[in-house]
Structures are given as structure tokens and as C-alpha cells.
Image (cartoon, grey):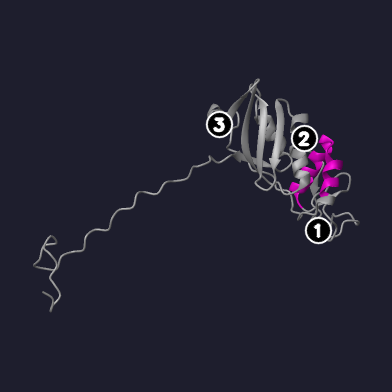
Amino acid sequence: MPDTLTATSSAERPLSVVPDSACAHCGLPVGAFPVVGEDQAAFCCVGCSVVYGALRTAGLDARFYALREVDGSERTPARLPTASTLDLDDPTFRDQHTRPLGDGLRCTDLFVDGVHCAACVWLIERMPHVVDGVADARLDLGRGRLHLTFDSDAQLGPMQTWLAQFGYSVSAQRATGGGSRRAPSRAPPPPSAPPGRSAADPAPRPAGRP
């Protein structure tokens, strides 16, 4: 994670950075207190600065931002994921959320939070080229669902860490056909009998009828 990016006050802001300047990552206005990098790139928040630095370090920035320019989707600031409680290498996760494919491979489906454009799809599907043990990655953008194929003996923690540096977090795919069942409905209790008469007694006939 780059350590050359620091938040500056309006007094310390370089003269070229005005509040209406576009964030180098998301394109939104940087505001009165931008985060400015060593290369004088300005950002609207720390999240955007960190993701921008990670993309440049990985050599993925040129293609990523080119795709964003032609995508036309709504721009949003990057959000750094909080510490995840999901351990993808826990045996319980492997038993419940992965399945064998044969030929030494397994697969899993995960939800990815933070994806919103074609550039995100391209970036995430680059995983097999940069993360050891990942054989294939396919992202359904509309559902935010990642289908991941990996070597059976591979650790998935590095994949989770790789995604986090770009602002993406993952959660386990929900089980299909799940959901809580409703308790069976009960028949309403019989009406209470009037005083002096048992509920088992026949109801009195209306007056005037035989």
C-alpha cells in the first residue's frame, strides 16, 4: 500500500488543485481538502488515493482507466473494505462453499462488493494472471457474483487480499433454496360458548323456523 499519499489542508494544497478539480481515480470533485500524491495527483478521499496507487503499482492503471472512460457508468469514490471476518481458507468454508471439479480443481461462488463498471470486471478477471492458484475468474456484474476456479491445494487468502487493495470485499454466496420456513398455520380456536351453554351443544335455531 503506497505511503506517499497524504491528506492536505486547503492552506497546504498545491495551487493547481482547486475544489472543482477532478479526482484522479473516480473523477468526482476533490473538494476543499483533497488527498495529494507525490506525483501531484489529487483525490477526493483516501480510498481513491490508495486504489489509484495499487493500480499503478500493479501496472494495471492504463487499461483500467481507459475502460472507465468509455464505460459511462456513474462514478463513485473508492471505499476501502473493513477487516473481513470471512476466512476463505477455513475448512468449514471449503466444505460448505466450494465444490470439486476434477483435474485438481475446485470452484466457489462469492459476492463482491464495490463493483460497478466494465473496468471492475476487467480488473477482477485479471486474477488468474497475477494470483497464484487461481485458474479462472468470471464476474457477473449485475449480480456482483464472482465464479472462481482454483487449484484444490491453493490458498484463497491471497485472492481476498488482492481484491481488497482495489476496494473490493467478498462474502460467501448465499445458499440457493434457503430461507426460513414458516411455521404451519394453525386453525383458529372454536368460538367461546355463551354463558350457560356448552360449546358442544347445538346452536339454537333462529326464531320462526321449524
Question: 207 or 175: nearer the eye?
Answer: 207
Precedes in sequence: disc 3 or disc 1: 1
Which of label 3 and label 1 is nearer to you? Answer: 3
Circle 1 residues within 10 Å: few <14, some 14–19, many ≥20:
some
Asked if disc 3 and disc 2 are in contact, CB closer than 8 Å, the reply is: no
The residues bearing labels 3 and 1 have C-alpha atoms spaced at a distance of: 41 Å
Residue wearing tag 3 = 93
> Magenta region: which residues?
45-68
> What is the spatial separation of the Cα atoms under label 3 and label 2, in whole angstroms?
24 Å
Q: Earlier in the sequence, mark 1 or mark 2?
A: 1
| Residue 146 against residue 42 in the figure, above or below | above
Disc 2 marks which amino acid? Answer: Arg
Q: Which mark is on residue 29?
A: 1
Q: Which mark is residue 126?
A: 2
| Residue 60 covered by magenta stretch | yes
Q: 74 above or below 202?
A: above
Is residue 197 shown left or right of residue 117? left
Closer to the camera in the image, 84 or 97: 97
